[in-house]
Image: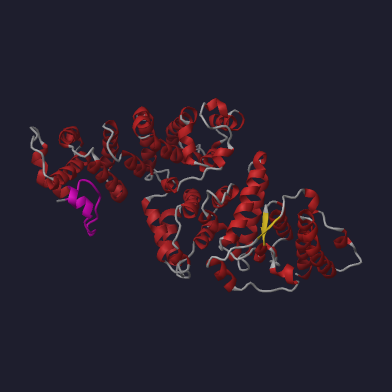
Amino acid sequence: MASKLIWVSPYEVENQLELSLRQAFDILEPKLRPPFSVTIPDPEEYVQLNRAIVYGVLCYPDLAKVYIRYLHALITDGYALYTSLLVGIVNELHCKLVDCAKSQLIWVTKEMIHVSAVGIDGLLVSLLRRIVGGDYGDENVWLCSELASLFLGKWDCLLEDDPLVLTSALYSFLRLLGDHCRFLGIAKLENVRRMESEFCVRMFREQLHLCLKIGRDLLRLLQDVLYIPEFGEIWMDLVLNPCSFRTPGFSDISQIYQSRTSSRYFLLRITPEMETQLRFLLTYVKLGSQMRHQTWFWRKFLSRPEKETILIDIVRFICCAHHPSNKIIQSDVIPRWAVIGWLLKLCRTNYIEHNVKLALFYDWLFFDERADNIMNVEPAILLMVCSVPQYLDITQSLLGFLFRLVDNYDTNRRDMVIRGVSSAFKEVVRKGVISSLDILVTCPGLAPYLKENLVRFLTSHSEGVPLNLLPVNVLSLTPQKHHPSQAKENECGTEAVDIPVPMSDNSCLSPCPSVQNSGQTQADSLQSLVQSLGESLKQSSTKALQSLENVLLSFIRLDNQRG
């Protein structure tokens, strides 16, 4: 018997989930008609009745209300089994569902919200994941519109029974709104944009305490729609008038920056099929054998120009929601940084490239080793270090972008950003992600201003400078190659030793007179500076910091002249 639930090609193997639902309906369909049986079913029959009713509701809309009444009469588990069957259909069969079944799926979801079914939050999250980013086809726009309407229409029920699912909807619709507003010429998006905007504004204005549970990525998404007047006003109130939200405990936007976003939110903008393929690529595919897998992924999910917006969500997912085990990290499986480097090459527009880099570095800006996960910042530093020297343009582009973020992302909270980035640099060395930063500081091909900025940043904005942040070349005055065994030592738990030095002001950045004296060569100056560094350490930490900065900057100048 042909399926009324999904589209099946003539030579396609039968789907086991669909088969189990259809067979249960074929056997039990006579029992689903009034008058209903008043006997309590045994556990096995209870499972079969739930399967039969799921199939009947989705495939026979004219009888759906009759089937649901029977479900209400026999339910004994708070609808947990019934809801789990619906979740399985959404995750496994949604792409194949016939149009009638898709419509019925939304209808029965509303019914489950009405009866406060156990697991309704999981069903709603699964449906949200089915809205594909960068897809402006009729079916995808219809689904987005239906779900936006559902969340607005069931606002009170959800707020009372499952308030946290509203944060998942906010994350999804705020992210989608940023994309939908970039295509103002598409008429069918007008109604969707209106409902997305209405829902998101209502969440900010009425339920900010729920919005805050998303964490710092809430602001990343909000900043993408600030040109929309109502969201610009929300931003201004968050920054200048936080008390207007009447949210106890919220007094400054810095509190949101300091709150890490849970990995479950990053899954919302990745479809189950994308997640499966990405996890397979990052778990089983060997480095050097990834080309055909990447090509297949690109053709399947990214080939159309408008779909490049998904790159932003994929990078955020890889950084924050896929953390490989130590066994995989130490194997020859393609690392996360290599996949992100490939994704960066797929960016066609400056807007997408900017946002992909922001997704890569976002946790750097507010990194706190006490609360943040080192795995979130690992891909960026490894991509910069491992791109030297073969792909130096990537290293320069990323490092330059990071410095521009530090200076411009939030000028009123620049000190917080500096502390975050400094902490990230320090922690990747301390935890052994890389053995030292000398490969960047002493790289001959790296732009001089980037090396000088890196040195000044590391020495001027950190509370302590790890010894292995000092370039090997500076200490020996002879170029040395970094040996892989150094990385192995740190991976085994060897920690860097910190030299406690205070924060320095800009006056410490000017070169000392001995460096500027034209009568001395750069090499002589360096030798003199290194000798004076020991004396400065004995005298005061401030002088030591100034001497250290002068040594590093002088070496960079010498290195550049030799290059």
Q: Is residue 358 visible?
A: no
**Residue most toward the right?**
519
The segment highlighted magenta reads 2-21
Q: Nearer the viewer, residue 138 or 425?
A: 425
- Give the quadrant of the C terminus: bottom right
Q: Is residue 47 visible?
A: yes
Quarter residue 510 falls in: bottom right
Does 480 appear above or below 169? below
Does 2 appear above or below 145? below
Q: Residue at x 64, y 48 (%)?
A: 419
Coordinates of residue 13 in the picture (x, y in percent): 22, 59
Q: Nearer the viewer, residue 480 or 8?
A: 480
Whether the magenta-drawn stretch holds residue 296 is answered as: no
Q: Nearer the viewer, residue 478 or 351?
A: 478
Q: Residue at x 46, y 46 (%)?
A: 262
Coordinates of residue 135 in the picture (x, y in percent): 42, 46
Whether the magenta-drawn stretch holds residue 11 is answered as: yes
Q: How is the image coloured?
A: secondary structure
Coordinates of residue 40 in the picture (x, y in percent): 10, 39
Horizontal side, residue 283 vs residue 455: left or right: left
